[in-house]
Amino acid sequence: MNSLLNVTTVLSVILFILVLVSVRRAHIRVEYSVSWLLASAIMLIMSRARPALEYITTHTGIPDTPLTVFLITGSVFLLMFFRFSVIISHLRDDNIALAQRVAILEYHVRSHGGNES
């Protein structure tokens, strides 16, 4: 159990550092990095708070503490992936609307301004 928690701790610290480096190099926007930083912080807290894990395990009826770690971590990432799917869907819709506006503007420019491309 301790080795699993240590691995989870190391992975959460690596994720935290990767997100900070990505923000610094402008590979990821700050508003999206917050979700990743929160996820890594939750992983770190859960991997270091063994009494909290045991409390959750006993009160939810989950048979094993390592399973609790994976369920919590998986749930956090599942929520993040859902959030990013919603963001991507909105961006796609905005992209379509923008392309339609550009097409309308091109039509107006061509109909009023001549045949220049």
Image (tube, grey):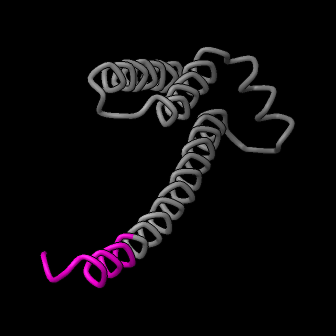
Given residues 96 and 46, the one toward you in this image is: 96
Q: Residue at x 35, y 79 (%)?
A: 108
Q: Residue at x 49, y 37 (%)?
A: 32
In the image, taking residue 114 as reference, residue 5 lies left or right, namely right
- Quadrant of the rendered image containing residue 18: top left
Residue sitting nearer the eye, 81 or 13: 81
Is residue 67 placed above or below 97 in the rendered structure? above
Q: Residue furthest right?
A: 59
Dominant SS of magenta comes to helix
Position in image of residue 55 (x %, y %): 81, 26
Asked if the magenta segment contains residue 103, the reply would be: yes
Q: Position of residue 110 (x, y in %)?
A: 25, 80
The stretch of residues the image draws in magenta is 102-117
59 w.r.t. 55: above or below: below
Q: Which residue is more in the foreground, 54 or 115? A: 115
The structure residue drawn at horizontal position 54% and vertical position 44%, both measured from the top left corner, is 77
Inspect the magenta stretch and tell me whether residue 63 lies in it.
Answer: no
Question: In the rendered view, does 78 fall on the left or right side of 53?
Answer: left
Judge from the rendering whether residue 108 lies leftward or rightward of residue 32; answer left or right: left
Image quadrant containing the N terminus: top right
